[in-house]
Amino acid sequence: MNPSISEKVIKPERCAVAFGIPTSWQTFERDNTEPNGKNRFAKGFGSAWDKFGLEIIAPFQKVVPVVTKLGVNVRTDVTLAEFGQLVSNEQFDLVVLFAHWGDDAVEFHDGFACVPDMIEHIPVNFDRILDLSVCHPDSLVLALRRDRPDSLVRHIGFRDEEKQRKKVTPRLWMFFYLALFKHLKHRDVTYNNALIDVIQEFKQITQRGKP
Amino acid sequence: MKQLKKVVEEYLERIGRLQEVQLGLGGKQSVKKEDNILLSQLLSKQVKSNEYILILAILLLCVTYLIASFFLLSHRDDASTTKIVSGSAFLLILEIVRRLRQLWIEKNVLDISLIMLRQLPPDQAANFINVLYWTFIRRSSKRMEMPDDKEIPR
């Protein structure tokens, strides 16, 4: 890993968020009714469209305008190729990938991409930050550490069968990133420090809310 | 509707359909026939209790009407009493009719749910109950608490 990226001050204008999950009714309908798409994120909602609206569209519509105003580049319905373009673009110090993990593959707008395909689309000399807002992409993280050693990869943590699996709830994480980008905007901090600060803040809020 | 909402939420929680969808961690768990049988039993109990409430509400309606009529006839020359009795009776009858309407809607939801639970295979019945909850039960219950439900964008 390139030591300089972990020490660099990150600003929202040099960040991109790529949504592989559907964030519109149109894409949701397409994915939900796809005959061969049984592992698609949209299928998890069944025919309960209101649930999708509540858990994805409503927070998305609240968060994205604010995050965009902070200067973050938000892309929706991202394909694997578009993801590759984002990570190849040196304009971005940080790329956040908001995607669904299933069958050892990451779901993009154009289908599932297995780990080798993902690695192929990330430049060999990629030395910036890749934040994986994906549920336990263990094999992808290991492959990135092995094949793209200069990158800084943040992920939810490896799956531990003994402990409860850490969950990636889209709604919660969207608001987390909102807080994170606001923090990056107003403070001159590195990405790791920003994460620590925001997580601490969330923990304190949770503690305050407990009886 | 609150009690129905609670029963359906417990059922959906048991079959893993109430929790927020995660960005991974496998597909939906399949529904056991026992879960649907239990829900049917709980809903059938609610149908019975709703019937009693319905009878009570109708009786109350009739009693209100009779009492109001008695007071109006016996004090028909007293304008202020007439106004008070008419106004109160009107408001009370309105409230009873509102509750009756809610009961009638809930009765229809319960009847349809029971039919689906009995006729459809477990997974399909669960899908039906899931959709019913998210598109109707949850919103109807909220509407009773808050008049505006702008949470879900269209």
Image: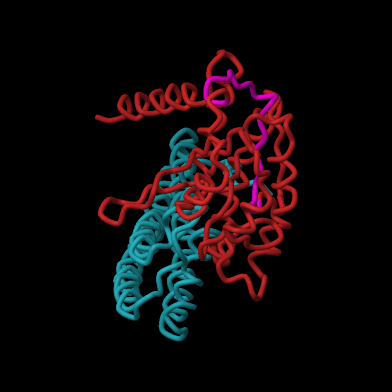
x and y percentages locating residue A114 in the rendered image: 59, 61
- In the figure, is residue B112 to the left or right of A58? left
A48 and A81: which is toward the camera: A81
**Chosen colour scheme:** by chain
B120 is higher (above) or lower (below) than B20: below
Q: Name chain B's colour.
A: cyan
Which chain gets the red colouring?
A
Answer with left or right where residue B1 lies relative to residue A106. Answer: left
Q: Tell me: A47 left or right of B84.
A: right
Q: Where is residue B101 in the image (x, y as percent from the top left)?
A: 49, 60
Give coordinates of residue A98: x percent, y percent: 59, 45
In this rendering, the count of numbered labels is: 0
Residue B31: give x, y in percent of width and height: 39, 75
Query: Residue at the spot x=71%, y=60% of the render?
Result: A110
* Quarter placement of the C terminus of chain A: top left
Quarter of image, res A210: top left
Name the foreground residue: A140 vs A106: A140
- Closer to us: B104 or A117: A117
Residue lying at 62% horizontally and 32% vertically, measured from the top left: A94
**Residue A17 lies within the magenta run:** yes
Picture residue at 48% right of the left edge, 53% below the top: B22
Q: Magenta stretch containing residue A21, yes or no?
A: yes
Q: What stretch is highlighted in magenta?
A: A5-22
